[in-house]
Structures are given as C-alpha cells and as structure tokens.
Amino acid sequence: MSHTIRVEGVSKKFDLQLDRARSIKELITRRNRDASRNTFWALKDVSLEIEEGSMFALIGHNGSGKSTLLRCIAGIYQPNAGSVTVDGRISTLLELGAGFHPDLSGRENIYLNATILGMPRKEIDRRFDEIVAFAGVEQFIDSPVKVYSTGMYVRLGFSVAVHVDPEILIIDEVIAVGDEQFQRRCFDHLYGLRKQGVTIVVVTHGMGTVETMCDAAAWLDHGELQMVGPAPEVAAAYLERVNAAEAVRRFDDGAHLVDQGESVVSPRSGKAVEIVSMELRDRHGQVVEAVEHGADMEIAIRYRLQEPMSNLVFGIGLHTDGGVAVSGTNTQISGVASGRLPAGDGEAAFLIDALPLIAGNYEISSAITDQHVQHEFDRLDRTGRLLVRRGSHRAGVGIVEIPGRWRLSRPT
Amino acid sequence: MTSPAKVWVYRDLIKNFVIRDLRSRYKRSFLGWGWSLINPAVTLGIYTLVFGFFLNGTAPLAGNGESTSFALWLFSALVAWNAFSSGITGAMQSFLGSGHLLTRTYFPPECPVIAGSLTVALQSFIESSILVALMVVIGNLAWTTLLIVPVMVLLTFFAFGIGMMVSLMNVRFRDINYLVGIFLQIGFYATPIVYRIDQLPQSVGGVNVAAVLKLNPMTHFVTSMRRVTYLLVPPTGVAWLVMVLSAVFSVLVGWTFFARRAPMYIEEI
C-alpha cells in the first residue's frame, strides 16, 4: 500500500499569549519568563498514515487538535517536532470562503482562489463554467461576494476547492454549513473524486459521514491520538466514550425523566388512580434519560392507587419530537391482565429488547384506563422525553429500523 | 523544492494578488485610479511651494542647457524615494493583509510580499512615465533617460529585500511598523531630495555631512535618478557599484531570512 500522507511524531505548540502586545521591550525584559506556562500543546506526538485514494476522517471534540493537524498536513503550520510527508498536490478547504476578497466579484474570486490552490490560469478558464454551475451562482457571478449568502459562499468555496484537480483534498467542517441538498451533492462529488483516486481528509462531527463514506479514521483527544483504524470501529469507540461521558454528566446533574419524584408532593394527588412518574431504565435497571439505538431498555409507569382496583389497563405511546405517532400499545393489546391490585404504589414496566428507534428525540405518553379502555383514570400526554443515541451498530435512516435481512440474486 | 522554485510554481497567484490589490484599491471611489496620481502630485506641489519658493531652493541647470525647474528636479528624486518607501510599506501591508489567507490555505508566503512590491513597482512605472512625459514637454531628453529602467529596477529590488525582512519581523514585533515609519521619515531628510548635496556646508560641527550622506545607499539612487533624467548624464561608477551591491545584498539577505523564518511565523499573523 502506498501512503500519500505520512505523519510521524508530530507535535505542535502554540503560544497562548499571542494576542498580548509583543514588543521588543518584552523580549528584553521578560527573556526568562516561564515558557511552559504560556504554551499549549495542540498536538502531542501524533503519527498516522493515510493511504492513497482513501477517504480519511479526523474525529474528536472541539479543541482536540483536528484542525491543527489538518493545517500541519496542508503545510500551513510547521510542527515543532516530527515530520509530515505529503506526496501529491493538495487542495484545502479549511474555512468558509477563505481566500475570497469581499469587494471582488465572484468571477474574480474564482480566479484568485483557484490560483491560491495552485491551478494554472488556462485550466481555470477551461473549468470556469463547471465551477460556477456546481456552486449554482450563475446569476451573481459578477456581483461582489460580500452580497452573497452564507450558503452561496460555501458553495463557491467548495466548488473551487474540488475543481482544481487535487490529488489530495483537505476539508474542515465547512460542508456542514450548506443545506441538505448541497451537502448531498458535495458528498456525491467527493465520492466521485475518491473513485478517481483522490485522497480525501475530512474533519467531521457527523458520525454518519464517517461510517458511510470513510475508509479510515483517527480520533484525537486533547492533541493526543486515541485510536486510528477502520472508520466504523473508530467512530464506535468515539461514540462510546462520548455517551459514557454524557451519562456521567447527566447523573451528576441529578436529572430525571419527569420531575414528579416521590419526594415532591404531587399536585395531582386525590385521584383514585394516579400516574406518579415515568422512568426510562437501561438493561441494568438504572434510570437514564438517553438510550442507545439497539439497546435493551424499559419504560416504567409508576402509579399510586388510593383504593384497590381491578383489571386496569396500562398503556404507553411514543411520538417523535415532531409529533409523529410512532407506536402505542397497552397491556390489553399485549394480552396481559393486571388482575386485582391493592391500594398503594406500584409499577408497570414495558420492556423493550433492542430498541428499534433511530437516533433522535422522542416523547413518551402513558395512561391508565379501565378494562374496556373507555374510561381514562389518568394520563401523561407526551411529557416524557426519550433521547435515542446512535449506537455501536449502524442503523438506517428514518424513525424505526425495520428488522429484516437482504437476499441478493446475481444477474444471470 | 527551494523557495524561489516554489514561488515560480505560484507565479499566477502573484499575478492575481497584484490584480486583486489594484482592483480592490480604488473600488467604489469616484476618482478611482486618479487617486494614485493625485497623491504624488499634491506632495510635489507642497514641496515645490515650501522648499522652492518659501525656502528659496534652487535647481541646477537641466541637461538641455536652457531650462531650470525646481519642480522637475524635485520630482525626479521623489519618484525614486516613493519607490523606496512605498516598496517597503507595500510589502509589509501585503504580507499582513494576506494573514487570513496564509493561515487557511497553503501557498509560499513570499507570494504576497512579491505581489506587494510589484504593485508598487507598477505605480513607480506610472510615475516615471509622467516624469519622462514632462521632460519631453520641456525638451530635456537624452539617451541617459533610458537608464531610468536599470536604476528603478535596482531600487525596487533594494526596497523589496528590506520589505521582506521587515514584513516578517513585523509579525512578531508590531513595533517594527512604527520603527519603519520613523526610519523612513529620517531617511527622507537623510537623502538629498529637497536640498542639494553640493550646497551643504563643508562641515557641521566638524562632521563632513556630504560624506556621511554618501554612506546612505538612497543618496546614490536619488542622485542617479536626477542625473539620468534631469542632468542627462549617466550615474557615476561608484553609484552603480553601490546600487548593484545594495540591491543584491538586500534581496539575498531578505529572501534568505524570510524563507527560513516565515513558516514558523505564519501562525502569528
């Protein structure tokens, strides 16, 4: 395998006091200042290799050093230690409209930007119409770019960057700014470039992009390389860490699904049958607010009976946060009889194996009715929140994942 | 790849930077390009009034043996001085102004500095042309007028080398910007532009001022410009030597320093 980009033991240090006045006087008088206190290591001993013709993702939270690494690869920053070897012509798209001069027209800026990316003038002449058409700014091509919308800015920037025939394309998170349709076209185009053998390095927060489009990925945290390998594995490991961190944070916050804990005197009391609270629990019985797609979980209805009741029906319902009804069921539909219940506090839990909901925000409703589901004793309408996260295995798009398999027949 | 080779690859970019600078400079102004002529014209007018009339400055007889014009005598020197001072400040501004680009895309950092110098060189070319046109009007022309080209080219390189040096240093120490301003102000009067070196007192407090002034390379550039355009005699051998050496030395030192240090300085722009 040939490696187009080889990063070896790269470290990059920044001076934190750059925005302070730097003067010759300072140089003389503060010669021996504590250097370590004023510096910040954005990258620490990072080594990785990117194969020719692959699509490589850099992931990590904000400030993890992704963009610094991109700049080192692009040759904009010189590492303080280590080396970056790049074999091929690089085109970069690191910031929205970088290289655009606001007073110049779209046409003038295309020429300026494309030459910055190293494209010869004749070549620009030849591809000019293509660049404009891809960006969809034909109408405004002779207007100064300062009147362009953000979307037009991004589209033009992207269009120039991908049309300069790079061998290596380096893209920061800029694509995320465009609308859905444009993003799709961008990815289609990137896919096409990759098939032509262009090596693409992207920084992204969209794990979907990483899993579906990238061959390999590297995960950075505080400037240190955590993992590098096949994209789905790295993405899964990263997500696991993020989810775990969030669970800890939420637990610390003492957040609950519905703020109607037992310690609080419920204003709803007085009813014969009352829903006290709803709880989401993971497979270990821990109360959670977020669940991963594909994980086992349960939704519990905690209720209080002032007097003994017979044949109650417990039901739950799920809506998306957009209000689309996803599913609803109750004990009667499921053929579970509650029988005679004494007065006091009880619980009805709906157990879900391998949650089929796709990542997103959902709302939970619950109700307790009589045996004919005619009289409603109590109801909590879409008051519970369920946050479904992307899990470790890949899911499709939409609201639910329909269980199923593929069968492929080869053309005969 | 060596630094000059990299720059050569990006020659189209330099051209586009120049075009950008020229196009954006006077965009949306009513007089547009007129401004690039009005500024030197006003300076020339003020200096002629103050130094020529108020202070009774005189010009030597022009090369054609009949005219004397303090304004043109002054103008021939101002063209040279403007090329020098704008060359330095233009390079600095161009480099600083490209900071947002340099931290977001890769291209040789020499490019904006070269483009800044070229933009100024173009302005110098226009001013020189006007000077020649005026000389044509008063009929003060000879083969030496052609020597404007080598003199101005050497001067542009001289300013370019210094420009490279200071534009990089300015990134780390913003004091350089002010120091350059002061240096240029002193330099203007330490060069025989508004006065004649042959009319200075023999010694001031025991110091031979004329000899000291000749240590300033700009004295030779300015004097040479005057000789070839106004007096219509070629520059002296010493002047040629000083001009060539200072141009070569300035570019060599400036470029080497720049190429070595610029990559580490870029993130600080």
Image (tube, grey):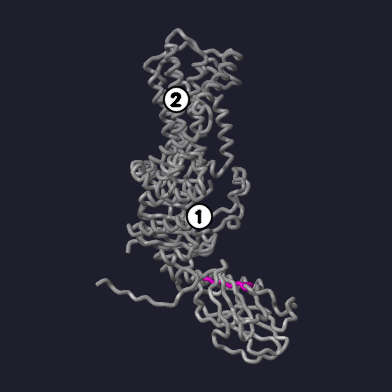
Number of numbered tags placed on the structure image: 2
Q: Judge the density around disc 1: few (<14), some (14-19), many (≥20) Cα neighbours within 10 Å.
A: some
Q: CA distance from mark 1 to mark 2?
A: 45 Å
Q: Is residue B42 above or below residue A68?
A: above
Chain containing the residue with disc 2: B
For mark 2, does the 10 Å Cα neighbourhood hold few (<14), some (14 to 19), or many (20 or more) residues?
Answer: some
Which residue of the protein is positioned furthest toward the left in this rendering? Answer: A412
Q: Amino acid at mark 2?
A: Ile
As helix, strand or loop, the secondary structure at mark 1 comes to helix
> Where does the N terminus of chain A fall, quadrant-wise?
bottom left
Above or below for A336 versus A252: below
Q: Nearer the viewer, residue A352 or A74?
A: A352
Left or right of B267, for residue A33: right
Residue A377 painted magenta: no
> Mark on residue A322?
none
Q: Residue at the spot x=54%, y=59% of the render? A: A41
**Residue at the location (47% across, 56% down)?**
A175
Examine the residues drawn in magenta and state their main secondary structure: strand
Please provide percent x and percent y for residue B202.
55, 16
Span colored in magenta:
A382-389
The residue carrying mark 1 is: A177
Mark identifier at residue B126: 2
Residue B72 is situated, as x and y percent measured from the top left of the image, at 49, 16
